[in-house]
Image (tube, rainbow, N blue to C red):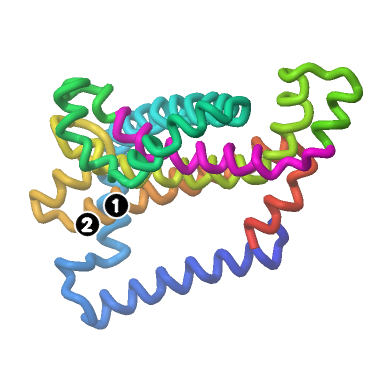
Amino acid sequence: MRPTRRLLTIAVFAAVLGLWWLASALGWVNAFLLPSPGKVAATLSDLALSGALARHALVSMQRVGLGYGIAVVAAIVLAVVFSRSAALRSLLDPLLEFLRQVPPLALMPLLMLWLGIGEMQKVGIIVLSCFFPIFLGVRGGIAQVDPKLVEVGKVCGLGHGEIMRRIVLPSSLPSIVVGLRIGLGYSWRALVGAELIASSAGLGYLIVDAENLARTDIVLAGILVIGVIGLVADQLLKWSVSRAAPWLASDLEMARA
């Protein structure tokens, strides 16, 4: 990120923080509904010193990491299989479109029956939330590959696997990265819903428990932590992609604009 853009980003966050402080200090919003930044910072400090924040954050990151990882593998494999089989696309497309329209949280009662109320139910919600953005990104990227490149690969004697690995997937990376980033964001959005039921740890549980106790400061603290972790995760994803595929650096730079 260029220095000017970095300064602009800092200025935007500082402006939001200043507006929040003014709204609290001047009484524009009831302190119960919107605690002051100082109150939320003190709450964050207390949670961090007690070890509760690290414990809840670690549990949530493990759930998101596992659910997101499963969704990435399943989405890429299924998209590649679809690209190879027109018959399979015709057979399964209507079913996948139907499932894509169903909110993952609406399936929570069924997941509780099928997977129990343990970790797998929570991971299942996260998988369902981020699978389709990744799948559509990979599938769309593969569909947009220039057929001439594939023909060149065939002329050079490359097999189907080599064409997929050396031509199709690299050419599809811009769309794949978009799907990966959207899916990663969806995984954090699904976290609170995943931790609503029979959970005793996690940032989503922390927020819901604080809501029941009317602790708005803890609710805001949990939201801020989720936002920061999600932002860091997105930056790490972009950094990893830029290291693995340097030719995408310009596209990722435009995404930061």
Residue 107 vertical position relative to residue 166 in the rendered view, above or below: below
Q: Where residue 242 sits in the image (x, y, percent)?
A: 71, 40
Helix or strand or loop: what does disc 1 sit on? helix
- What is the spatial separation of the Cα atoms under label 1 and label 2, in whole angstroms? 6 Å
Picture quarter with the N terminus: bottom right
**Residue 56 vs residue 181: left or right?**
left
x, y (%) of residue 40? 28, 57
Comparing 125 with 51, the one in front is: 125
Majority SS type along the magenta span:
helix
- Is any atom of residue 33 visible in this view? yes
Q: Check contact, mark 1 vs mark 2: CB within 8 A.
A: yes
Q: Residue furthest left?
A: 213
Residue range (magenta):
123-148
On-image quarter of the C terminus: bottom right
Where does residue 121 sit, x and y in percent of width and height? 24, 26
Residue drawn where x is 61% and y is 40% of the image: 176
Q: Which mark is residue 43?
A: none
Residue holding disc 1:
221
